[in-house]
Image (tube, rainbow, N blue to C red):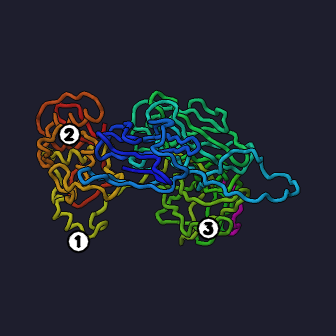
Amino acid sequence: MSELKGDATPVIIETKNNSITYRTGDHYEPLVEVVENQWYNIKVKIDLDNQKANVFIDGELKLEEAALNESTTKVNFIETFTPNSSAQGHYVDDIRVAGFLPEEPTDPEPPEEPTDPEQDPDSDQEEPSESAGGIYEAEDAEIHHAIIDNKHVGFTGTGFVDYNPNAPGGWIEWTVEVPVDGGEYTLDFRYAHGGTDKRPAEIKVNGEVVNPELAFDPTGDFAAWKHTSTKANLKAGVNTIRATGIAPSGGANIDHLRVFMEVDDTYEAEDAVFESDGVIVDNKHTGFTGTGFIDFSPNQPGSWVEWTVNVPADGEYYLDFRYGHGGTDSRPAEIKVNDQIIEEELAFDPTGGWAEWTYTTTKAELKAGENVIRATGVGSSGGANIDHLRVHNLADGGGEAPPVEVEDSNLEEVAGGLLVKKMKQLGMIDEEPAANEEEITRLEFMALVNDSFGFVYEEKFKNLQNKENIWEVSREEWYAYVLEAAKEQGYADHLVKNDSISPDQTITKKEAAQMIENITGDTISTNNGSLTWEKQENGYPIKRSRDRISRSSCCILQCDGCDVKWPF
C-alpha cells in the first residue's frame, strides 16, 4: 500500500484482489492486474485546485479526474508499507516528486525604468537539457505514451525510451540549444529495433514537420544500436525536436539524439605547412589523393607537418590520417591541436606496402573557427608517408574501420599460468580440442545460441534476486550465466522436466532445431540423432579449446541430415 498525505490522505494506491487499485474509502478501482516479480511505474498527478487525480501505470493513463480519497490543501508526505503480516511484501525503487511550490505574498516593489528585454517575456520554451558533444539523452526528454527502460544493454546515459504501448502516436520531445542561426544541422538518432517490422517516425522541429517518415529499420536485436538521421535548419538558441512513432507498432527504442553541424573535410598533406629540411612532397607511390603525399626525409625523428582547419562549432571531431608505410618498424607521431598535445604517440603501423594506404584515427576537441593540427614523427625512423588529414564528426566514425589484424595468442600469455590452471580445474578449458564426432551437450548448444543471437542476462534491478538456482543448477556455478540467459529468453523451455534441464545431457538434432524454431519462428525438419561438432571449411567449432585463442575463428554448426547452420 502507498499513501500520499498532507493535512489528510488524498490518494491511496493499494494491491487488492490481484490488481493495483485506486482506493477511495471502501471502494477499490482496479487499474491493472498484478504480475508477480514485475516492476511498475506508477504516476499520480494531483490537482489540488479541483481535488482530482489522474493515475498512470507504465506511462498509460488508467484513471482520469478521479475524486480524491480525502480533500487536502497540500501533499508533503509519502508512506508505503505492507498492511498486514499475511500479505507479501513489495519493493519501491525510487520516487520522483515534481510540481510547483506556492508563491509567498510579497509587498509590491516600485516599478523600474523600462528596458529592452533580452528575450520574449511571453516565451514558454523550456530550458534545454544539458548535453555532452551535442548528445541529448532520450530518458531526459519529455515523453508521451512511452516509458524509460534499461533492460537492453549498450545504451548511453542511464537508459533509453521505449514507445509503450506499441501503437502509433507516442512521442519524445527534446529541447536543444545551438549556436548558429539558420544553419543546417544533422539530427542523428541512436536506436535499436529487434523486431522485423519497420517503425518510422515523424520528425518535427519547432512544430514544423521536417521529415514525415524517417526510417527506423530493424537492427537485428534490441541490444544492437544503430543510427538514423535527417537534416534540418535550426535557429540560434532553443529549439524543440519531436520524434513521433507512426508505425502500427509505434516506434523503435531510442537511446539519444545528437544535434550537430556535419563536418567532413579533407586537407591534403602536400598543401600543409611542413618543415622544409625534414619533409618532402612526393608522388612515386600510387593510390594517393590530391597531387601527392609527404615523406619524412631524412628518416629521423622531429620533423612535422601542420594543417590549419576550420570547423563551424565547438565540439569533438575525428582526426583521420591517411598514410602508407612499407617498412617493418612502427613510426608513431605526436599529435598537437592548438599547441596542446592530445596524443603523445599515435600509431602509424606498417601497412604492408608504400602504395597500401590506410587510416589511423584519434579524437580532439576543436573550437569554432580555425584550429592548428600538427603531426610530428617521433619514431626512430621519423614518420610514415601521409596522404591527407580528414576532419569530421560523423556518428559512425566516418565509415567502416580498417580490417583488424588477427593472430593466435597463447592463453597463458593473456591470463597467466595460475589462472589457466584454475580454469582447467573448473572444466572451463579442455586439455584436448573437440573431435568432429564428439557429441554436443545442451549447455554447449545454449552457449552457441546465446553468443550468436547476443542473448545476455542482465538483472534490471540489482540485489533483489532471492533464487539460488537456475533450474537445478546453482547460481554459484561458473556457467550459470548461460542458463540464466536461456531461461530469460524461453527458447529452451521444451527441455525442462520437473524443473530440471539436464545441461550435461547430449542434445539431439530435434531438440536443437526446436530451440531455433522457438527463437526465429522458422520450421526446421531433421531427424532425432545426436548433434556433433564438425569443423567447417570457413570456421571452427566453439569448444573449450585447449589453451589457445584464435581471434579470427568463427563458429559454424551444421546438423548432419538437417539444414541448421551456424551462424544463419
State the SS at label 1: helix
| Nearer-the-camera pick, 136 or 532 | 136
State the SS at label 3: strand
Residue 193, image x, y percentages: 43, 38
- Name which residue type carries label 3: Thr
Q: Nearer the viewer, mark 2 or mark 3?
A: 2
Task: Determine crowd level at label 3: few under 14, some 14-19, many 20+ residues with C-alpha closer than 10 A.
Answer: many
Residue 347, image x, y percentages: 51, 63
Q: CA distance from mark 3 to mark 1?
A: 43 Å
Residue 246, image x, y percentages: 52, 30
Q: Which residue is mark 2?
A: 493
Q: Nearer the viewer, mark 3 or mark 1?
A: 1
Along the horizontal axis of the image, is 459 left or right of 529? right
Q: CA distance from mark 2 to mark 3?
A: 61 Å
Q: Which residue is mark 1?
A: 418
Q: Quadrant of the C terminus?
A: top left
Magenta span covers which residues?
268-277
Q: Is residue 57 above or below residue 179?
A: above
Number of numbered discs overlaid on the protein picture: 3
Residue 151 can be seen, yes or no: yes
Q: Earlier in the sequence, mark 1 or mark 2?
A: 1
Q: Which residue is mark 3?
A: 376
Q: Earlier in the sequence, mark 3 or mark 1?
A: 3
| Nearer-the-camera pick, 111 or 38 | 111
> What residue do we see at 64% from left, 39% from top?
231
Question: Is residue 405 magenta-colored?
Answer: no
Q: Earlier in the sequence, mark 2 or mark 3?
A: 3
Q: Is residue 514 above or below residue 429?
A: above
- Name which residue type carries label 2: Asp
